[in-house]
Image (spheres, rainbow, N blue to C red):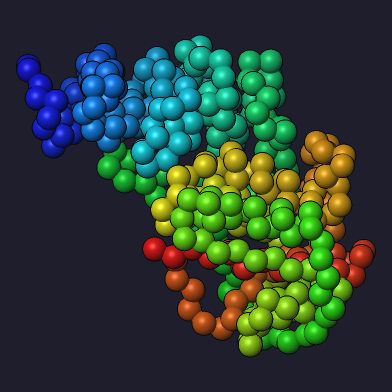
Amino acid sequence: MGLNLDDIDELTRHVDRLCDGRDWDGLLHLRDMCVAALQRGKQLWGVAAHAEYRLALEAPAEWAAQMLVPGTGRFALGPLSEVAASTHTWAELAPHAPAGPVAALAAHERVVRGEDLRGAEGDVEPVLDVPLVLQPWEPAYPVAEYHPDKAHFPTPPTPPNWDAKRSLGRPFRQPEPERALVDIAATWLTESNGRAEAVTVEGDAAAAVAALGPPTVRLAPIEPADALAHIAWTAASGGAHGRRRGMAAGRFTAWWTVAALTDSLDDWPLPPDEVGELAAELRWYLWDAAEPVTGWSLRLAVEDPETGRAYALSATDAT
């Protein structure tokens, strides 16, 4: 059938028809037509991105893997490395995936979904300094759920019990840990409306949160694995308006944060067991100011019993 490249609504409906008919060659051809039309000034980036997204999500691995290259899915619901990994195993994708960082991220996305890829190190470009298997001390990361017309990004569980506390400590600067904490929400800050602030105090977690200025502080202790899940969820997210980075990037950020908070960045990359041990030595808390939280938020506090220091982060993004 002839297609009118000026009718974006019809082109979008045609994407649906091709998917319903499992015509993946036809969908790839339509994507290529839209990309070529972009060079002629036609604003078909949305149709091209949607076609790429549907190929990564629904097509067999032979077609889905072709989307694992830089520049694809720029305006899709999520990074295509994560989209493809949500519906294909690495064994399915690997024979067709082009060498490069996007395909490597897809392998890491399979790892956060529980796949053990320790035998595939030679086939995966080293883009993240984290192992290709989950460690026993890591959480079940809250992975994205992609559908043809929507996506769901589950949040980690929040603790049921909160204690109101007030404590005083002496603030001082710790550039590396504070930078690492703020960088958890980097996408919220650079691509959306986010705000983030981190502080260090000599004292406990309540003192660190109080240094951020809220009149009331409520703390809830959480397990190290749960803290890593919250960090990874934030780092993976695009917030209100930013582009999602994916849970593989979130997992890396969680490991990096542990290293920064324990003054271990000079030894990076750390042995996996050591990262788990360091995370377990810290005391982790979520905090709030006894008021409703809207939009995207990570309010985290950390105590280091060995140094007597504590850190607090307030990161938010609004629609």
Residue with the most extreme left position: 1
Relative side of 240 to 274, left or right: left
Q: Is residue 17 visible?
A: no
Q: Is residue 63 visible?
A: yes
Q: Quadrant of residue 44?
A: top left
Residue 68: % across, % down: 46, 23
Residue 62: % across, % down: 40, 14
Residue 280: % across, % down: 81, 56
Kindly identify the residue that appears in the image at 65 percent across and 53 percent down: 183
* Quadrant (top left, top right, bottom left, bottom right) of the N terminus: top left
Q: How many marks?
A: 0
Kindly identify the residue that appears in the image at 23 percent across and 22 percent down: 40
Front-most of 216 and 154?
A: 216
In this rendering, is residue 265 above or below 107?
Answer: below
Kindly identify the residue that appears in the image at 66 percent across and 41 percent down: 252
Relative side of 258 to 54, left or right: right
* Quadrant (top left, top right, bottom left, bottom right) of the C terminus: bottom left
Residue 89: % across, % down: 50, 25
Relative side of 22 to 83, left or right: left
Residue with the most extreme top position: 95
Relative side of 62 to 92, left or right: left
In this rendering, is residue 140 above or below 291?
Answer: above
Residue with the most extreme front position: 41
